[in-house]
Image (tube, rainbow, N blue to C red):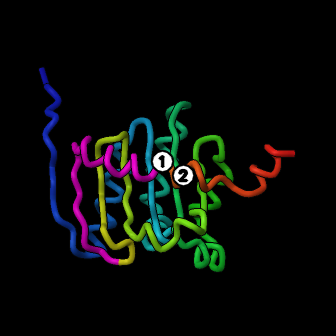
């Protein structure tokens, strides 16, 4: 009989390849949710086939799954387009992308991907590759999810706010 061991596999990542591998591993391990804080939808990470396939598998396999993405500096993603945005449009019931409200910009410079409130890849500088990845890190995940929640709530698209107040 196999037993699941709730022991983290923690490692420091220092190269883009390690960040990419960790991002895909975390997305692939998700069973319910993925939360992402990213500077600009980082196309080298989030437009790759292996990442997009992991997201599709998650949302198409589970009707209750949810992917939330908060973009801290959306100018580049808007200017260049993004395959992940296209996927989010097609699967909008499951994937939601929000642009960080302007009064938060400059205050949130980190980046992370969190799966199921436990697996985390955290980078203190969202434009750099150095970070920490852990597969069973509920306390660290909760810390970052708590910091994410208010900016997420405050960053609802303007057109939705207008519609709600009309």
Front residue of 97/160: it is: 160
Q: Is residue 43 visible?
A: no
- Where 145 falls versus 77 (above or below)? above
Q: Which residues are magenta?
A: 128-148
* Left or right of 32 on screen, residue 122: left
**Residue at image point 52% right, 58% down:** 70
Q: Which mark is residue 149?
A: 1
Disc 2 to disc 1: CB gap under 8 Å: yes
- In the picture as drawn, the residue positioned furthest to the top comes out as 1
**Residue at image point 39% right, 46% down:** 146
Q: CA distance from mark 2 to mark 1?
A: 5 Å
Front residue of 6/144: it is: 144
Q: Secondary structure at mark 1?
A: helix
The quarter in which the C terminus is drawn is top right
**Residue at image point 61% right, 77% down:** 75
Examine the structure image and report whether residue 146 is included in the region drawn in magenta. Answer: yes
Tell me the residue that label 2 is attached to: 152
Q: Secondary structure at mark 2?
A: helix
Horizontal and vertical percent for residue 79? 65, 79
Q: Is residue 130 visible?
A: yes
Q: Which mark is residue 91?
A: none
- In the picture as drawn, the residue positioned furthest to the right comes out as 166
């Amino acid at each position: 009989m196999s037993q699941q061991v709730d022991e983290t596999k923690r490692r420091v990542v220092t190269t883009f390849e390690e960040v990419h591998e960790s991002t895909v591993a975390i997305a692939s391990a998700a069973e319910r949710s993925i939360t992402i804080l990213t500077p600009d939808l980082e196309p080298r990470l989030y437009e790759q086939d292996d990442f997009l396939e992991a997201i599709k598998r998650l949302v198409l396999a589970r009707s209750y799954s949810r992917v939330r993405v908060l973009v801290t500096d959306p100018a580049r993603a808007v200017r260049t387009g993004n395959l992940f945005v296209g996927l989010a449009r097609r699967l909008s019931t499951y994937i939601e992308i929000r642009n960080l409200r302007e009064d938060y910009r400059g205050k949130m410079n980190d980046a992370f991907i969190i799966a199921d409130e436990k697996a985390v890849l955290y980078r203190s500088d969202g434009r750099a590759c150095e970070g920490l990845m852990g597969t069973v890190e509920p306390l660290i995940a909760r810390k970052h999810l708590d910091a994410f929640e208010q900016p997420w709530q405050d960053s609802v698209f303007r057109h939705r706010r207008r519609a709600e107040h009309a």
